[in-house]
Image (cartoon, rainbow, N blue to C red):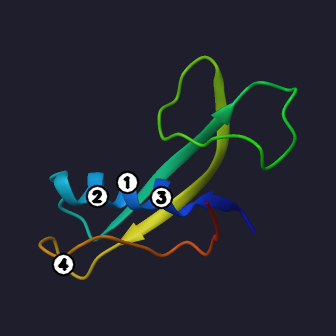
């Protein structure tokens, strides 16, 4: 199971709530730094792909209708 910062997922959810997305499901790709000196789990995830990052995993958000709030539906272990 992947682990992710609870604060990071809350920030992502807030950003999604401010975006004009018409669907009720939305997938977000997460990336991690390419720094090979770090141990697994010691990296910071981002939703921005650059030349210094690599794909880590996807997470899925959903909502009941286009006017409701987004919620995370991917099972994750939260860290802080």
The answer to whether the residue labelled 1 contacts the one labelled 3, judged by CB atoms less than 8 Å apart, is yes
The answer to whether the residue labelled 1 contacts the one labelled 4, judged by CB atoms less than 8 Å apart, is no
The residue identified by callout 3 is 7
The residue identified by callout 4 is 65
Dividing the picture into quarters, in which one does residue 26 lie? bottom left
Question: Residue 48's x, y, as percent?
Answer: 47, 33
Of mark 4 and mark 3, the one earlier in the sequence is 3
Task: Judge left or right: residue 50 versus residue 65.
Answer: right
The answer to whether the residue labelled 1 contacts the one labelled 2, judged by CB atoms less than 8 Å apart, is yes
SS category of the residue bearing label 2? helix
Residue 14's mark? Answer: 2
SS category of the residue bearing label 3? helix
Q: Is residue 61 above or below residue 31?
A: below
Q: Is residue 47 above or below residue 10?
A: above
- Give me the C-alpha separation between circle 1 and circle 2: 5 Å
Task: Estimate how packed mark 2 is, as few (under 14), some (14 to 19) or many (20 or more) residues with alpha carbons within 10 Å.
Answer: some
- Seen from the viewer's position, the closer of residues 19 and 79 is 79
Q: Please give the name of the residue rendered at 85% of the width and 26% of the height, measured from the top-left corner.
A: 36
Q: Is residue 50 above or below residue 13?
A: above
Task: Judge left or right: residue 19 versus residue 32.
Answer: left
Q: Please give the name of the residue rendered at 52% of the width and 63% of the height, measured from the top-left corner.
A: 6
Task: Estimate how packed mark 1 is, as few (under 14), some (14 to 19) or many (20 or more) residues with alpha carbons within 10 Å.
Answer: few
The residue identified by callout 1 is 11
Q: Residue furthest top?
A: 51
């Amino acid at each position: 199971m992947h682990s992710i910062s609870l604060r990071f997922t809350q920030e992502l959810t807030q950003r999604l709530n401010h975006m004009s997305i018409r669907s009720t499901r939305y997938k977000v790709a997460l990336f991690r730094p390419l720094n090979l000196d770090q141990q697994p789990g010691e990296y910071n995830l981002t939703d921005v792909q650059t030349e210094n990052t690599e794909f880590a995993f996807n997470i899925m958000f959903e909502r009941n209708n286009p006017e409701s709030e987004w919620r995370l539906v991917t099972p994750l272990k939260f860290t802080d």
